Image (spheres, rainbow, N blue to C red):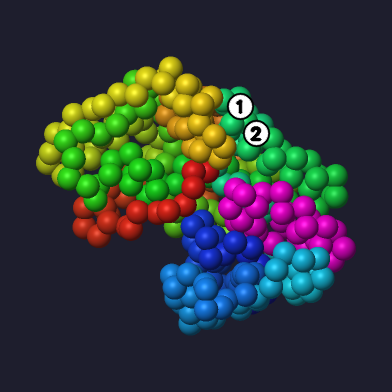
Amino acid sequence: MEKKNRILVFGGTGYIGKNIVKASVSLGHPTLVYTRPLNSQTCPSKTQLCNDFNSMGVTLVQGELQHDQILKVIKQVDIVICALAYPQVMEQLKIIDAIKVAGNIKRFIPSGFGAEEERINPLPPFQAFLDKKINIRREIEAAGIPYTSVSANCCAAYFVNYLLRPYEKRNQIVVYGNGEAKAVLNYEEDVGMYTVKAANDPRTCNRVVIYRPPKNIISQNELISLWEQKCGYTFGKAFVSEEEIVKRSQTLPPPDNIPVSILHSVFVRGDFTGFEIGEEDLEASQLYPDYNYTSIRQLLDIFLVDPPAPASAAFG
């Protein structure tokens, strides 16, 4: 029986990270999560999640992002997946340095599970964020570390909550731009599963994998129409013009200007679907055709029956 790669996840208690951890365990990988030390000030939900991980057989490693501490655990694994949140993007330089010293890592997946940063040109606040991701990619390449970068597009449950507000009794739904731009909304559990599969796939080494399953390409207007069909209610639409969104991106202080810029990129300009998937590109649903991903239609059924709690995660 083939030995499974040992996987270490940084940011494993975060919004995307927890789905990666669960996918890793479900696929039979010995899984480690590197997390800040738990104490009396730790958020109860994080403490509960760590308890859940323990019951699943996950090894929790508590420590700070300090070289000696992370080097020690990196030497014990085969694959490193980073799911640190936006404010910690550049902290990955410490992980890269440790991977270089350790010399044993078969694959590194850096954080940043949204846009394919080198194929879009968004408003300045979002571009500044993507520039940091590009810098991380260049550092990985310069270090000669085997990597896979993933473009998971938009987290579906998060954006369904954000766009449709299913928990609120409302007559109108806010639409950004004219509502016709196409976005890609991928269920968070599928993002986790595709990521672990890609991390173990020889075909994806030193490549970018784009998560663009055909059934998850949808515009705001189509999403609203589908939700109306499923819940049996007709909503009005409150349109926010492109001019207003651009103005907000220019006047809001950082980091509040970043989410507005992302909305513009995704739902006004349609940047995430604005480039073709060519023969040389790697697309997740084509790489793993036997995996039954959750379509937008299926996700909305989940919201009707047992809606996921609204996420507090930031955009991206």
Residue 36 position in % (x across, y down): 63, 70
| Nearest to the observer: residue 251 or residue 76 | 251
Which corner quadrant of the image does residue 218 belong to? top left
Q: Is residue 233 above or below residue 34?
A: above
Distance from the alpha carbon under mark 2 to that under mark 1? 6 Å
Residue found 73% across the figure and 57% down from its top: 107
Circle 1 residue:
124
Magenta stretch bounds: 80-108
Considering the image in quadrants, where does the N terminus appear?
A: bottom right
Of the numbered discs in the image, which one, if any, rests on residue 79?
A: none
Residue at the far top in the pictured view: 243
Q: In the rendered structure, which amino acid carries the disc numbered 1?
A: Pro
| Nearest to the observer: residue 102 or residue 260 | 260
Circle 2 residue:
128
Residue at the far left in the pictured view: 232
| Nearest to the observer: residue 2 or residue 143 | 143
Residue found 69% across the figure and 62% down from its top: 80
The answer to whether residue 248 is visible is yes
Please report contact status of discs 2 and 1: CB closer than 8 Å, yes or no.
yes
Residue found 81% across the figure and 66% down from its top: 67
Q: Secondary structure at mark 2?
A: helix
Residue 214 position in % (x across, y down): 42, 37
Decide whether residue 7 is among the magenta residues: no
Q: In the rendered structure, which amino acid carries the disc numbered 2?
A: Ala
